[in-house]
Image: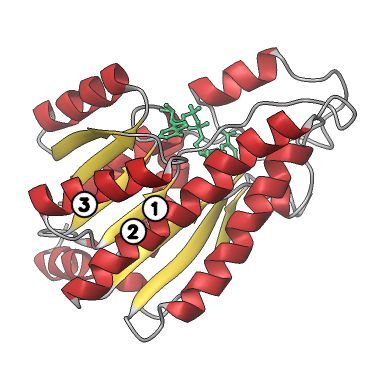
Amino acid sequence: MAPKLESKFEELFGLQRRVAIVTGGAQGIGAGIAKLLADAGATVVIVDLNADAAQTEARRLTEAGGAVFPAVFDISNEAAVIDGVAGIVAQHGAPWILVNNAGIQKRKTFFETDTEFLDRNHAINTRGTFLMMRECAKAMVAAGNGGRIVNIATLGVMHPMLLGLVAYQSSKGSVMAQTKAVALELLDAKITVNAVLPGGTMTPGAAAANETAPVGPATRGFPLGLCQPADIAAAVLYLASPAARCVTGQSIAVDSGFLVS
Ligand SMILES: NC(=O)c1ccc[n+]([C@@H]2O[C@H](COP(=O)([O-])OP(=O)(O)OC[C@H]3O[C@@H](n4cnc5c(N)ncnc54)[C@H](O)[C@@H]3O)[C@@H](O)[C@H]2O)c1
């Protein structure tokens, strides 16, 4: 790359000396995001429930040249989030980037959906996103350097894709609403809050959800093909970068042409 272009890219997308927290970074889309942010120079903390997978992924990315650390806690548990984020801040300093990616995507038909299932989806996808934003934003505001929050919702909030997602889509609809509400709250602190809406993406979680899915047609296919985690990570990198300084309260669907087809 020409030297001038290289330094411009660095100014726009470089994340050196930035701390990034990626929830659910032990596998799937989160692992793709952790890798790209580490490649861009960030110190990345993978927050995940799965201790073995988080440690393995952090080691793998560090061996590949990144600075990636695991932190094991449940984002749906308020006390665990308060302690967990405080521990990360004590060890690495305040985050400049938070990517709220951890989520569950199990499927049940509307009539099979009981309140326990509904509440479990909301506890992780909705409450977990809220708790992580609140605790990380406190540290970001105290540090006074602005910041970036990127929430992973789903294309399903724009248009249903598959049967069995009423609990999931309602939990992610709240993620969209929180994105806009918190973007307004954090304007003065120069912390931007945006969302990425993945369409069908090849991950262990999606494969497991499809195994037990209700039988019925998907509304339509993905003309540009199923996404890989790296495709979602690329949109996250933009929103998490210095380049996106003037973008807040917005969402980007990475949907392989689903909505326009
Ligand atoms: N894969 C898709 O097709 C797709 C489409 C749209 C949106 N999404 C969203 O993208 C995100 C990532 O999806 P994926 O397919 O990579 O998922 P995945 O199931 O493969 O990985 C999710 C990760 O989150 C972790 N996690 C789950 N609950 C947690 C909790 N309470 N606390 C901490 N960590 C927890 C898991 O251990 C796992 O490592 C999710 O929010 C999902 O809803 C995925």
Residue 74 visible from this viewpoint: yes
Q: Earlier in the sequence, mark 1 or mark 3?
A: 3
Mark 1 surroundings within 10 Å by alpha-carbon count, few (fewer than 14), some (14 through 19), many (20 or more): many
Amino acid on which disc 1 is placed: Met
Q: Which mark is residue 135?
A: 2
Q: Are marks 1 and 3 in contact (CB under 8 Å)?
A: no
Viewed as shown, does residue 219 lie left or right of 203?
Answer: right
Viewed as shown, does residue 77 lie left or right of 112?
Answer: left
Q: Are marks 2 and 1 in contact (CB under 8 Å)?
A: yes
Can you identify the residue that label 1 sits on? 132
Q: Callout 3: helix, strand or loop?
A: helix
Q: Nearer the viewer, residue 60 or 99?
A: 99
Viewed as shown, does residue 256 lie left or right of 187?
Answer: right
Q: Which mark is residue 65?
A: none
Q: Nearer the viewer, residue 76 or 6?
A: 76
Amino acid on which disc 2 is placed: Glu
| Image position, residue 175 (x, y; %) | 58, 56
Could you tell me which residue is drawn at 45 percent across and 44 percent down? 101
| Image position, residue 234 (x, y; %) | 40, 50
Could you tell me which residue is drawn at 64 percent across and 56 percent down? 174
Q: Earlier in the sequence, mark 3 or mark 2?
A: 3
Dot 3 beta carbon under 8 Å from ligand 1: no
Q: Which mark is residue 86?
A: 3
Work out which residue is located at the far top of the displayed protein and give it. 211
> Which image quarter is the N terminus in?
bottom left
Cα separation between marks 2 and 1: 5 Å
Viewed as shown, does residue 210 lie left or right of 48?
Answer: right
Mark 2 surroundings within 10 Å by alpha-carbon count, few (fewer than 14), some (14 through 19), many (20 or more): some
Cα separation between marks 1 and 3: 11 Å
